[in-house]
Image (spheres, rainbow, N blue to C red):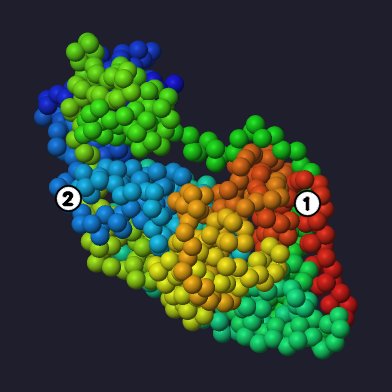
Amino acid sequence: MAARSTERLLNLLIALVSRERGYTRAELREAVPSYAESASDEAFERMFERDKAELRDLGYPIEEVSEDPLFPDDTHGHRYRIPRGSFTLPPLQFTAEESAVLALAANAWTDASLGELARRALRKLEPAIGGLPDDDAPPLLQPTLTAHEPSFEPLLSAVVRHREVRFDYLARSTDQLTTRRLRPWGIGSRYGNWYVVGWDLDRKDSRTFRLSRIMSDVSVTRKEFTPPEGFSMNEALSQMVSHAPARSVEVLARPGHALMLRRMASRQEPAAGAGGWDRLHIPFAETEILAEEIAAAGPGVVVPLGGDGTAPTMQAEVRAAVVRRLRNAATSVAAFRGVPVDWSVKSRKGTRNKLSTADHLSRLLEIVRWVYAHQGAELEETARRFGITDQELIADLNTLFVCGKPGHMPDQLIDASWDDGHVYLSNADELSDPVRLTQPEASALLVGLQTLRTVPGGDSEAVASAIGKVAGAAGDAGVLANAVGARPITDTPAPALADVMASVRRAVGERRRIRIRYVVPSRDELTERVVDPVQVFSSNTHWYVRAWCLGSEGMRNFRLDRLSAVEDAGPAGERPAAQEAAAAAPPAPGTPDTVEVVLVTDRRSRWIADQYHATRTAVVRRPGGARTGAAADHEAALIGFQTVEAACALVTRYGGQLAVAGPDDVVAQVELWVNSALDAYAASERG
């Protein structure tokens, strides 16, 4: 069915481009085979209106010209056409520096669909770039982008299409869930979070919403609006304030435990006697963020009451937030313990990533333009370029082979051949021109470029000029460039982190070996490693270094804020073949997995399946819970962890948002972790 839809769209596109005077609706119904087979006028009208919208979204401006000036609103008297040249890419030329930053921006996305949009944009710009860069050599510095929130893609679409939206939002100040109606002006990231800015139709004022607090599906309406002149998402993000730690809380930690919290502490007081707990004084700005870190430390940490059984306001606030997380985690773990998972019931994530008709057509058009410019290209090389198998490419060529100009006689069809292992195309001249970027393609690439500006030393003239050219390639330079944005993760990095980053980047650039001391949170352990660093990259809120670990004889990723020492250890060694192959792989936070766990996530934490590279996902329902509506569904994800403790920490960090369904021995360890942490708080209340 999908292949037939793609054929219909392609035949319609060829018809509209190939005839200067255009076609009436009646003529198109006869000219496009699928339309001629329509059972009714209503079915044809629905298909035709949907197809027009699809082609316009792909960057083809369909003109509707009335044949009767006395009745301009009579659509049945219109002729439809796509003028040659109206969809072609404007003249562009990128410098070598601009081409390099474009490649970095296109490869920044870890999300498959958004990454494909950015890479598709890069392929369209290839003639102006002068050839795509070599992907085999990883850049020394690479920011990465992840949009965990399900609301990101519909909101991005609404921003670029200027459509009003509706969603349910959990306000941080009141903890109340309300329905909001918004005209979204822009979308961007700051402090590791995604935000949308726009006009709140009910509050009659501009508002900023954090995407992680959107609790429902985003409904994109057909109501259009005009964004305010001069709006800049980067300016809106710059006005957000990251509050410096102004308060301090006292935390008790078992000796040898809670190493990450110890790194955050401004002062530590060792335990007075055997069996005692160390006293940590931790500065903080936001209660909930600190509560996440404390809850993740599990039973090794307690936020104490005062000596008289009471607690100062700040102490009580943090303690309550931690206990709430632990209790919610205990409830979720109990609810989903041993819940059966039918892996054949695919999650919405799997459905969402299915190739759409528009995406398939876009790929077919790219293949036409590529082969026209590289007649005789090897079949394998062409398939590899588009990230598909040889069989998928042959299926695409077969689809092209049955499409062509109205009439569909042999001399009117696209001629495709590949019998000798080399691909040739002809009789598709109308489709061979480079097409301007669609707004989603340009937006994905622009967010990557905006993110590059947040990298130390990345706010260069080449990035700024590339942003302007990419926005212009979509035909709406001013509005589009200002609708997406990204600002630095932190305004002023901590001096210790800045020193570590400088040392690591120097080692990468000069190919030096380093000796590091590294905190492993999953084992709550401080380790020493000797590594050859190959790349520094970011993933939303954190910076990492990819390095070949001599002790493990494998590529590892180390978070920079977990490095307590970096020492030069001489020149890096020659890379073996295994190291070269690992260095060329895309960066992804994490370490090799040893324990497989079935996590159950709700809507708020569904991003974990992507972040932790789940091998399987499926929809499950809470036992005894509601069985109607998308909100009733939870997602099961099979994820590998380095240790069981890493899964335990994740469950308590996001208390109530996820649980563990299996295996049984892991569930038992998670329950012990959560209940032991709660028991420690109960004991502190008893004094």
Label 2, secondary structure: give it: loop
Q: Residue furthest right?
A: 686
Q: Quadrant of residue 677?
A: bottom right
Q: Mark 2 or 1 closer to N-term?
A: 2
Q: Is residue 433 left or right of residue 517?
A: left
- Helix, strand or loop for disc 1: helix
Where 39 sits versus 647, above or below? above
Q: Residue at x 79, y 44 (%)?
A: 338
Q: Determine the image quadrant of residue 79.
A: top left
Left or right: 63 as drawn, with respect to 648: left
Identify which residue is drawn at 71% across, 38% down: 341
Residue at left 75%, top 46%?
A: 661
Q: Quadrant of the N terminus?
A: top left
Q: Nearer the viewer, residue 222 or 542?
A: 542
Q: Amino acid at mark 1?
A: Val
The mark found on residue 666 in the picture is 1
Front residue of 185 and 403:
403
Q: Amino acid at mark 2?
A: Leu
What residue appears at the point 34 percent right and 34 percent down from the top-left corner? 381
From the image, tell me which residue sits under label 2. Answer: 92
Q: Nearer the viewer, residue 657 or 39?
A: 657
Q: Hey, which residue is sitting farthest top in the picture?
A: 409
Quadrant location of the C terminus? bottom right
